[in-house]
Image (cartoon, rainbow, N blue to C red):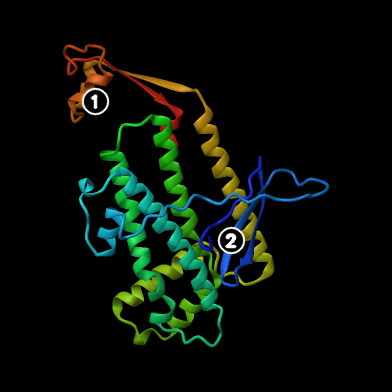
Amino acid sequence: MSRRLGSVLGSRLWRRRSIQYQSSRHMNFRLVGDRPPRIVGYYVVYPEIPEDTAENNAFMGAITKGDWPPFQSASDKEFYDGFIKMALDYGATIFEHNDVLEDQTLEKTFATVVAPFLKEEYNVHYAYSALLQKMTTDWLDVDRKHFKSNLFHAQGTYLRNVNPKFASASLYKALKELYADRANLNPWQRRLIEFYMKELKCHGSDFESTKHLELLSAYRARADEFRSKFHLNISTTHDTKIIRIDQENAHVLKDAPDHVLRALSNNQESPRVGPWTMRMHMTTYG
């Protein structure tokens, strides 16, 4: 339960807060909808946390051992649930580590600032890349709507748990202090810290004034709202675009496999003769 991030549901995003939970855990509460004149209560919906571990999930077990498992070594469910569990665990690790970095007495070394999350971060990045490749090349035959929903959920889970690291002012200060004494760092450690610091600056984590932080918070809230509305509008639209390709332009499909040409061709007996018709739905761009 302590690793679960909560969301309060409604119709429209209006504000985000961060509160302390169980002395060491942060939870991002998303309050949505117009604020009522009198608040009588809230309800919190926790995400479903997979019970998968390295012992009962072949995908997680292979990554934990430093192996790159072939797609056939684990089921689609193990790939998906394994990644979701790893991403949520990584997000919880980042929140806990930010609390540790707030301690002014902590000696700032590579082992105390970066190493605590580095291996877990590598595993999450690999798991996410492997899941995307699995879903786009060797996924089970499901309804397209469900596939898009699962893909969107995986992408959102990845971003929600990876991005908070780059919004951490405490991590930026610790890295800055560590980089000031970079003579004691290995070349790869120095390059990694430089990369982290640039990412943190791009996210505005080097701002210290209250005015800048409030502006940055408002911008992030607006960006989240725009992204949510964008995907919602795409997923609910019925607009389509029809593209027809005749034999004169057949070269654009010269590398297409036979089963794709057969699905697009108006001539099922000779799919490579054409013409071909494609119907592009707006969800293609989601």
Q: Which mark is residue 260?
A: 1
Q: Position of residue 247 (x, y in %)?
A: 21, 16
Image position, residue 121 (x, y; %): 37, 64
Q: Residue at x 52, y 77 (%)?
A: 100
Mark 1 and mark 2 in contact? Answer it, CB < 8 Å: no
Q: Which residue is mark 2?
A: 27
Q: Residue at x 46, y 84 (%)?
A: 108
Task: Bin the neighbour count of mark 1 within 10 Å (Cα to Cα): few under 14, some 14-19, many 20 and up.
Answer: few
Horizontal and vertical percent position of residue 251: 20, 25
* Residue type, mark 2 in image: Met
Q: Disc number at residue 47?
A: none
Side of 242 where 137 appears, left or right? left
Image coordinates for residue 245, horizontal then vertical, percent: 28, 18
Q: Cα distance, mark 1 to mark 2?
A: 46 Å
Q: Residue furthest right?
A: 37
Q: Earlier in the sequence, mark 1 or mark 2?
A: 2
For mark 2, give the secondary structure. strand
Q: Nearer the viewer, residue 191 or 4?
A: 4
